[in-house]
Amino acid sequence: MKTLLILRHAKSGWKDEDIPDHDRPLSTRGKRDAPRMGQVALEQGLVPDLVVSSTAKRARKTAAKFSETCGYDGPVQCEKQLYHGGPDEWIQVLCDLPDQHACILLVGHNPGMEQLLHLLTGQYVMMPTAALAHVALPIQQWQLLQDGLQGSLIQMWRPRELP
């Protein structure tokens, strides 16, 4: 059994409209919510073995703040094809990962995150910024994701629903 954590990047800032989309930073709320979601993962015993992120600044910063709070101390693997990538790109990245990783955290953008969650679980769930989904996958090897398997959405956390 593999565990997949899907995290939409935290709220980004729009103060400087001249900054390219790829380089937008986290907003004050985003800087607060990313570590809160890391705390949720820690409390649930869901510390990832590997963190994979889009190369966008807001995604990388979300991954870093989440990782620091949940206790993940490994590198964040950044993949440029995941910046605005769809489910096919996310699946391909997952299929190429070593099987030694039992729990992987993906950090990215919508609509790709919601589409990936739907593809893997058959459930359409809205993922606002910093939402975290816990998906159980009935596989032992990441490459088996290509076979169209059906995973289970175990839990969804949204920052605004937390105490």
Image (cartoon, helix red, strand yellow):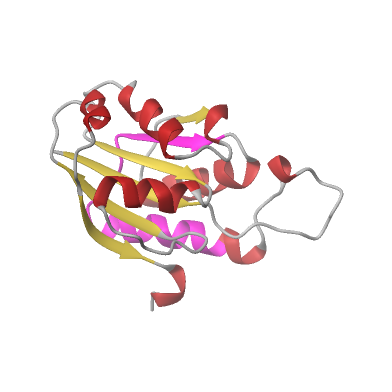
Determine the residue positioned at 76% across, 59% down.
Answer: 14
With 46 as the anchor, is 80 left or right in this view? Answer: right
Residue 41 colored magenta? yes
Q: Is residue 96 above or below residue 154?
A: above
Please provide percent x and percent y for residue 95.
Answer: 31, 25
Q: Residue at x 14, y 33 (%)?
A: 139
Q: Residue at x 38, y 57 (%)?
A: 132
- Quadrant showing the C terminus: bottom left
Residue 87 as seen in the image, left or right of residue 146: right
On the question of residue 76 being in view, the answer is: yes
Quadrant of residue 106 within the rendered picture: top left
- Residue at the bottom extreme, as displayed: 163
Residue 39 image offset from top left, x and y in percent? 37, 59
Quarter holding the N terminus is: top left
Per the rendered image, the range of residues in magenta is 32-54
Give residue 102's quadrant in the image: top left
Locate residue 55, reporting x and y percent: 59, 34
Q: Give the quarter of the image for residue 73.
A: top left
Horizontally, residue 56 falls left or right of residue 151, namely right
- Tally of marks: 0
Of residues 105 and 135, the one drawn nearer to the viewer in this rendering? 135
Q: Is residue 30 part of the magenta span, yes or no? A: no
- What residue do we see at 39% from left, 74% from top? 162
